[in-house]
Amino acid sequence: MSAPLYNRDILALAVASAEHLPNPAARYHANARAPLCGSRIILDVDADDAGRVTGVGMHVEACALGQAAATLLARHAPGRGLADIRAARAAIADWFAGSGGAPDWPGFDLLAPARDYPARHGAILLPFDAAIAALEERAAAA
């Protein structure tokens, strides 16, 4: 029997997305939308000269799973660069596809109940897609 989709840990992470307020003064921005469910995120990212994330702000319009994933991204992206976030996104997609273990991203194991709900995968990948877009903007400007 699988775990409940919306458990206490996921709901706590979803609520915590409010801790990462939008930051219009950030240097890099990305808007992303998951076409299947309509989830949206506006991500504001600051990065150092080496391209490592130094800060994340966001506005998330998504289900609790999408909000939870956004919180995990915002909490653990600082210090990571574009290659790290691309690798994490690929590992998450592989995990969803059943061809890999839980991604090596702190706290992501809490989202394990969502593996059985493909309609939710886009919302969970959305913050990573937005972070990649923002960091690609930074790379293009460098």
Image (cartoon, rainbow, N blue to C red):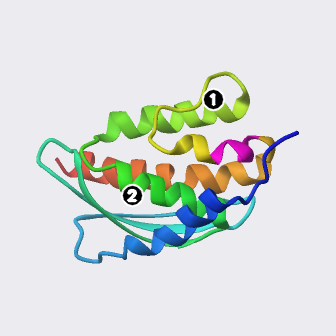
Q: What secondary structure is found at the residue carrying circle 2?
A: helix
Residue sitting farthest toward the right = 1
Query: Magenta span has 53?
Result: no
Magenta-highlighted residues? 111-115
Q: Quadrant of residue 69?
A: bottom right
Element on which disc 1 rests: helix
- Expressed as whole percent of the image width and height from the top left, the position of residue 85 reads 40, 40
| Residue pointed to by mark 1 | 94
Are discs 1 and 2 less than 8 Å apart at CB?
no
Residue 36 screen position, x and y as percent: 75, 58
**Residue drawn at the location 76% of the way across and 54% of the way down:** 5
Left or right of 135? Residue 51 is left
**Quadrant where the image shows the N terminus:** top right
Circle 1 Cα neighbour tier, 10 Å, few/some/many (<14 / 14–19 / ≥20): some
Residue displayed at 67% across by 67% down: 63
Left or right, residue 34 beside residue 15: right
Amino acid residing under circle 2: Ala
Question: Residue at coordinates 25% horizontally, 45% vertically from top-left?
Answer: 139
> Can you identify the residue that label 2 sits on?
74
Seen in the picture, residue 19 relative to 30 is either above or below; the reply is: below
Q: Main secondary structure of the magenta part?
A: helix
**Residue 130 as seen in the image, left or right of residue 49:** right
Mark 1 vs mark 2, CA separation in Å: 21 Å
Q: Which of 86 and 55 lies nearest the eye of the viewer?
A: 55
Which one is in front, 63 or 36?
63
Residue 65 appears at what percent x and percent y? 64, 59
Q: Amino acid at mark 1?
A: Asp
